[in-house]
Image (cartoon, rainbow, N blue to C red):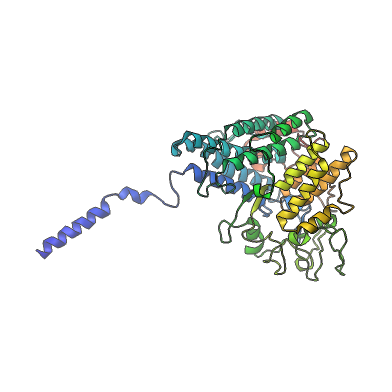
Amino acid sequence: MKKTAFIFVLATLLSACTKDLTSLNNDPKNPLEVTSASLFTQGQRQMCNVLTSSNVNINVFRLIEQQWQETTYTDESNYDFVTRQIPDEFWREFYALSLVNLERAKKVVPTDVTDPKVQKNDIAIADILEVYDYYYLLTTYGNIPYSQALDINNVFPKFDDAKTVYNDLLARLDADIAALDPSVGSYENGADVFYNGDVVSWQKFANTFKLKMGITIADSDPTKAQTVITSAVAGPGGLFTSNEDNATFKYVASPPNTNPVWVDLVQSGRQDFVAATTVLSYMHADTTSTGAQDPLRDPRLPYYFTTNSDGYYFGGDVGESASPFNAYSKPSGPALDKSSIGKVTNADFPALMLDYAETEFNLAEAAARGWIGGSAATHYNNGILASMDYWGVAQADATAYTLLPNVLYTGGALPVQLQQIALQKYLALYNRGVDAWIETRRLDYPVLTPGPDANSDFPVRFTYPINEQNINEDNYNQASTAIGGDDLTTKLFFDVN
């Protein structure tokens, strides 16, 4: 009897073990089917990582914009972007890691979202971020693969005309704004790190980004720019009206979803970057060992940078290697300086993708050009105050700063107004080097002078990836000829001054 019972139990266990052997083929860490929500999150994350990173293999824009300076290896500060194939990596991050996930998310939505209205919102929001991605590719390279991009079966996509693509992106953005329905939700449960699927917030984001796109072509196509800007201002849901509307990617204190700057500078233990003299000079930092405070000093200084080992602000000269880490100011954060009140190098410091301060400066420029109503001075001051508020400056100190003689909005001829706006926008775009680079190219202010050992004049674009030159040669040659030469100094479609 005992023997029979044992055989029965053994047979039962064997049956249970062999009932579904095919399940052993499923890797829970690498699923065969991925939800649209997870694809969207990954596309959003990759986009934020590449624009936030300080890794010199990917993002060197803080160096180009002379916010930071390298301490030892100065290749990138001197515009050598080929040795590390930086254009290749920046291109790959957008096409292969962000855009491809967003495009797949749009295709998967109808299969895993049951409500047709939510489907429509999900697809529109993913497309808004595709427009966002393409904007940075266009303003970095010029003509790019677009109509034939993201097709795995086409390894030789043609390059489309940048201005034509730009206008198509604006049309897509209009369609996405019209498609959004605030009566229902979208990506929730943390899938949308910006707004957790709040559709009203996405309406504001889309209109605000549309305003940004309009301002970008203010000189190259003023008629189109004015139309785009006035439409954005009147768009459903409106524009950003405070820092509460900012599009931020919230990193966490523990890997793997930590602030890329923390990964690059703290986790790695590297001592590669210090403050650059250029940005410190515009902030009227202490530049002598006495530590005497300039009465025109910018109150954001301790939020942007640490002091050096002697307790004053001191930056490295652009492109020069004699910048010992401890002798110069560093990007802020307790990890690099326990007395720092800034957070740039904190593990959980969020990525800032679009913000209220930039929006107010864009409105100031639109008002100065006479394209919208309202006061350019008011929008200009709002931009400064919004930047100060974001970084944690006391309101009284921020207001006092707007009244300083070198800050007070003076009005006058349009070029004078644009220079004032450009300088304060440059300072507000600290730690957002890509966006600062777009603005200094477009407005030609502040003037950023190359270091004495620079390989070229100030770069106004990236050269095309070496992989494109070698593998997609015919289309690369056509694109290079069309834009006027594949050089760092070839001006792009929006940069006409």
Nearest to the observer: residue 154 or residue 33: 33
Q: Is residue 264 visible?
A: yes
Name the residue rendered at 69%, 37% in the picture: 138
Residue farthest toward the bottom in the current orientation of the protein: 310
Picture coordinates of residue 188, whole percent (x, y): 51, 46
Q: Is residue 76 visible?
A: no
Residue 267 is left or right of residue 376, and the answer is left
**Quadrant in the picture for the C terminus:** top right
**Quadrant in the picture for the N terminus:** bottom left
Name the residue rendered at 74%, 38% in the picture: 486
Q: Quadrant of residue 411?
A: top right
Picture coordinates of residue 18, whole percent (x, y): 26, 52
Name the residue rendered at 69%, 54% in the picture: 56
From what the image shows, is residue 221 above or below residue 39?
Answer: above
From what the image shows, is residue 296 above or below residue 131?
Answer: below
For the image, the number of numbered tags is: 0
Picture coordinates of residue 148, whole percent (x, y): 59, 31
